[in-house]
Image: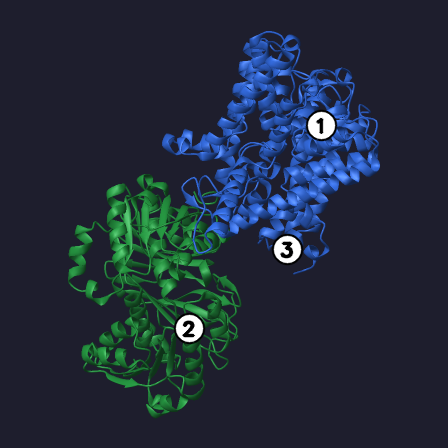
Chain colours: A blue, B green
Amino acid sequence: MNRRAVFSITGKLLEATAVILLLPMLVSIIYKESSFLSFLITSVISFIVGFILRRLNKTENNVIYAKEGFLIVALAWLSMSLIGALPFYISGEIPSYIDAFFETASGFTTTGASCLTNLEELSHGILFWRSFTHWIGGMGVLVFIIAFVSNESDRSIHILRAEMPGPTVGKLVPRARDTSKVLYIIYIGITLLEIILLLIGKMPLFDSIVHAFGTAGTGGFGIKSDSIASYSPYCQWVIACFMFIFGINFNLFYLLLIKRFKAVLKSTELWVYTSIVIISTLFVFLDLRINIGNIVGSVSDTARAAFFQVNTIISTTGYATSDFNSWPSFSKGILLILSFIGACAGSTAGGLKISRLIILVKLVSKEIRQMVHPRAVATIKFEGKEVSSNTQKSVATYFAVYIMCMASIFLLLALLEPFDFESLFTAVVACFNNVGPGFGIVGPTGSYAGFCDASKIILSIAMLLGRLEIFPILIAFIPSTWKKR
Amino acid sequence: MKIIIFGCGKVGLSIVQSLSSEGHDVMVVDKEPKVVEDATNIYDVMGICGNGVDSNVMNEAGIADTELFIAVSGSDELNMLSCFLARKMGAKHTIARIRTPEYNDESLGFMKQHLDLSLTLNPEQMAAHEIYNVLRFPSAAKVESFSGRNLEIIELHLKSDSELVGKSLSDFRRDRSEKFLICYVLREDEVYIPGGNFVLREGDKIGVTASPGEILKLLKNLGMAQKPAKNVIILGASMTAYYLAKRLIDQGATVKIIDKDPEKCKIFASSLPEAVIIMGDGMHQEILLEEGIEHTDAFISLTGSDEENVLCSFFVAGNTHATVVTKVNKPELVSTAERLGLECIISHTQTVTDSISRYARALHNSMGCNVETLYKLMDGKAEILEFKVISEFGFSDVPLKELTLKKNVLIAGIIRGKKPIIPTGADSIKIGDRVVIIAAGQTINDLSDIVDRKESK
């Protein structure tokens, strides 16, 4: 186990975090707020810690394998969350460090679950940092490092694979560094597009930037306590559409860029994703109209509410324009199921991922066929390519671990908290799948403030487990990983 | 440069490593998914599992804007066909590995032309050529020649009784009349470009540049000269053995080939009538002794198994005075073989990879210098290049003592017309010359790269 390389890269990451922190500091200065000091202090701390880690772990041997990739991702995200919480804590705007850690973890993992109740009182710098963590965490911090900072890319594929979500991660172009750069360029481009469209809708600049960050990372931190509800219908449509867009596999955007349109149309995942969104929106729309038509308003209001909420949940963003907590059970059920499914692999969204869902469904049908016809030989194909038995196994295993983790976390939480089943269950689902809001007390008008410190820590870990797709964190906590080899 | 490599066996993988470390965008195509996975895990390249003759796969690999397509799969026919297809689909240059003798005779030129191949590689023939070179100077571990054999570099391993051990380079040079230059020293795992004060130690491997005549003189005066091998025993009736035997027989040497496969022996017996073909297992020391290894001038192990080659050579080296040449393809085994005392090790993969690197480097060049030859030392830690100066490269006609070269770069020789020049400070590089450069730890793409621009005027 190449410990030195692992710690050295983590150190480099913390140094990069120090630089990233200068941006919210700049925002604080622009708005003449005192919180800029807390960013400065945190930046210095981050740089020192990162620098020490790197000096202590200088090594010529930078050969890393899959194991080191996982550990780097786990350590990097944990340490970033711990340090990223400091500005909140030092500035006093989030008095409890555990709360600050929860909020930061929620930021980087693009969950968007908040334990704050006083959003309107926070300074611009702090709010900016909160949303910026979404943007950075969405595409991935290590992807950023590989794209712009790292100089050797021979083994970076292991880090890329560990951080990017999906059953299999491939490159867009031969060199890992170029792949990361392309991803970030596409990411920056679409974010800018959203900011411009929001500005056109007369949303103030700060709001536009912050909400674009939240949409791009599919995070969901807002700056108003009613999330997006008070913004204009145009802005709501824009945000809804971009939430959908950011749930699409970024490989497809690259294919569009290089004009391979046919390949994009052949993407089964994209078709399934779009169909699920359309069908869910339709069902929710009908349900709302029939059952609570008088409350939600006109037909266009209902359509907008249905479309927005479906997209926010399936992309695991978590913005809200209606209090879907008070919706009829059928719609709530659809939203809950969408929380599990998530959006496409290779996007910034959370959840199980649609490609895994497709493979699981095909696995099940193959199993059933084989039970009926034991001698038959069948293979599974996904998007024209055969799915190797290794991949089949790993998808099935992931699903099993996914369920087991959520169940255990739920039981732990139920021991600690006196809340009702609906709230606890959806809290776990929402955090693990990086959605943000659930039902009950953690609904769109509620928050996670009522949870005790221990629960907040457990939920933060759940968020990290979900975003990093479980195994990096699990592997980091097994002692045998750390043995020399 | 965008490069596609079809076929990721031993040779393919070695090429992948070499080209991706030089910064090219490499795409690997192979029909075994495991092979592709391994390549993409270890090197910074992309891979597609598929057949190089399938146009869908080629499209996916991006053949349309590929600069260089290299086919090194196991089948000559697949290689030729995929190169042909690649060219038609837009690749600018193609390289195919063609091993079978039938394709490598007079029909090669015809095929090259009609299949539009930029370069064909015959690793076995190239290896045979290398071994033949070594047999000309039996005390050398390696012999590399540059254009037209006017200048050569031979690698000598310094044993404890060698005159050079303990001397510095300037001391050794002082009273000698032969015109030569010691241009590199391999010690432990490092490559050194030695200055005058460098002191040689036992176990060092030194590279000496000189014309063939001067090399012979030097070796004779050092007591290291041996006559070229007249009696050669080859173990393993492989393709390389065939090419080598032919060459040796043409030069008048006696060749004995030992192999345990009766079919192969029959084929060789009919195609090499002047050679003596023995059917037997070379691993049985009795057979080797019986066939006279104690009196032979050279023993070459060319079986298909690296391990067998190493073991047989070890036995022969320990029991006779013959020059022993061993074929070891797996890079991991090379250092083990060297530790066992085997000095002269030939690797197909290394020869092919060097050729392809040279070709890729030459394609990359835009200025007026062509890379004519390229050899890599110690897994790429250093390289020896021969540039032909076609037009003004910025420093022609400047006396060498006024040029500040980059650290770890040395001009090992200049070939003007047919005359080799061992450069002194007063010499200069003129247009039309061929210049041999040694560079450690860096890639020289163009002749002007050797000069340290910050220091030179």
The residue at the point 25 percent across, 72 percent down is: B243
- Chain containing mark 2: B
Quadrant of the image occupied by residue A139: top right
Nearest the viewer among A101 and B311 is A101
Is A477 placed above or below B186 here?
above
**Residue receiving disc 3:** A2
Is A81 placed above or below B431 here?
above
Quadrant of the image occupied by residue A395: top right
- Tell me the mark number nearer the camera, choosing from 3 and 1: 1
**Residue receiving disc 1:** A113
Nearest the viewer among B258 and A444 is A444
The residue at the point 33 percent across, 39 percent down is: B65
Is B331 placed above or below A62 here?
below
Element type at mark 3: loop
How many numbered circles are shown? 3
Query: Mark 1 is on which residue type?
Result: Ala
> Seen in the image, is A91 located left or right of residue B9?
right
Q: Are marks 3 and 1 on the same chain?
A: yes
**Residue receiving disc 2:** B306
Asked whether residue A292 is in view, the answer is yes
Is A120 placed above or below B404 here?
above
Q: CA distance from mark 1 to mark 2?
A: 61 Å
Q: Do the residues bearing badges 1 and 2 touch, measured as CB atoms within 8 Å?
A: no
The residue at the point 45 percent across, 58 percent down is: B380
Nearest the viewer among A360 and A347 is A360
